[in-house]
Amino acid sequence: MYSTVSMRRETSTLSYWKHVSFAAPFFALFLLIIAYYGIHSEDTRKWDVTESNYKLYTFPKVDPEIVPTKNFLIWIFAMVFLVPVIDYYCVRHCNRKLRIICGLNVGFGLLEAFLYTVALTEFGKKWVTEPRPDFVDRCTGSPTDIPTFDANGIIICTQQITEDAMLSFPSGHSSTSFVTGVFLTAYFIWLAYFRKVRTPWRSKCGEWKGSAGALLGDFSYMLAMWPLVVAMYIAASRIVDHRHSPADVVAGSFLGTMVGLVVFPRVMARVSWLENTYPHECEGSSPTQCCRNGSKQHRRKNTDTGESGDVEMLNDEANDNINSAII
């Protein structure tokens, strides 16, 4: 049990700089800079388009893309800023400072997962250097004409191509959309079912609001899966646009899923630790006291209807008096 003095002392130690994970995204950004600027595909190129394999890369280049890169990045960074706001307004039993800190940890966690995924994707692209499915179209200007080859059997390009034409594996759109989708889906399920928040079907003490609330809660997890649906749409669009092969998309989706499953539990553990370590930061009664009071009111109603419950109610009141005496 905490005394009033110790509780005030711990309240003063709650700090934005101390309890928000600022360092993790910067470390992920450092790895991304190394992957983007420190590795050159020309130094690692092992995958040439030759007479024997050029037919694999004769898909026509599609413009414009179904999901432009700009729109795709806007969605991801919008969620990075929106998630802390959602966390702040849904978790209402704690005071403003703790809610801001918890929300920032979730937002920075999503940003960290995104940056780690981009860094790992860049490492893979620069190491494998697989041509894109529309490479011949980019190289010769036509996906149907038979290209010419040099003495070594390597295709001769008549058009100026960029490094991007040789960076097909794994799919960056797929990896980053899936790390965002997995992280957000896990977050929404955690928020709706495991944290002390108020939802239309559940009180912050975890009690279902009638049979209709329990039924809605059984199916509401499907609503939390909308980020995964968006991720699958973005990943599939890369195949339709001939920017990636199915293998590229599967590999990118797997990479993003793995990073999301690694980073999110760390964020969840940090936020849970903050909420459990600083219970006195909660406004009014603590969640435990709230649930205990709700249980006592429920037992009083049972007593009024003639059902047993007086003993349990008296025991709860005695425990409350003992706890107050200790504090």
Image (cartoon, rainbow, N blue to C red):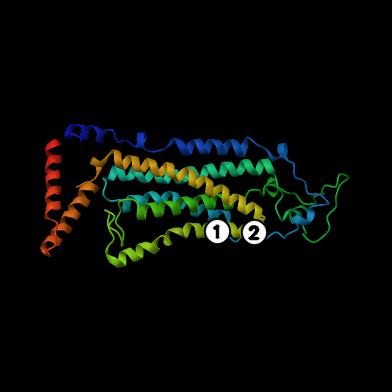
| Residue 59, image x, y percentages | 73, 59
Residue drawn where x is 67% and y is 58% of the image: 242
Residue type at mark 1: give it.
Answer: Met
Figure quadrant of residue 200: bottom left
Q: Earlier in the sequence, mark 1 or mark 2?
A: 1
The quarter of the image holding the C terminus is top left
Can the viewer see residue 45?
Answer: yes
216 left or right of 49 in image: left
Q: Is residue 171 visible?
A: no
Q: Tell me if label 1 and label 2 are in contact, CB under 8 Å.
A: no
| Vertical comparison of 265 with 27: above or below | below
Helix, strand or loop for disc 2? helix
The tag on residue 232 is 1
Q: Quadrant of residue 97?
A: top left
Q: Residue shown at 11%/38% (left/top)?
A: 325
Quadrant where the N terminus lies? top left
Alpha-carbon distance for marks 1 and 2? 11 Å
Q: Give the quarter of the image for residue 4.
A: top left
Crowding at label 2, few (<14), some or many (≥20) Cα neighbours within 10 Å?
some
The residue closer to the viewer here, 272 or 25, is 272
Residue that lies at the very extreme toward the right in this rendered image: 151
Question: In the displayed structure, does residue 117 sit left or right of residue 87?
Answer: right
Rendered position, 265 above or below 54: above
The foreground one among 65 and 279 is 279
At x 49% / y 47%, what residue is drawn?
Answer: 260
- Tell me residue 254's x, y (percent): 57, 50
* Direction from residue 219 to residue 33 in the image, left or right: right
Residue type, mark 2 in image: Ile
Residue 133: which disc?
none
Residue 234 placed where, x, y %? 56, 58
Residue placed under numbered mark 2 in the picture: 239
User: Under tag 1, what secondary structure?
Assistant: helix
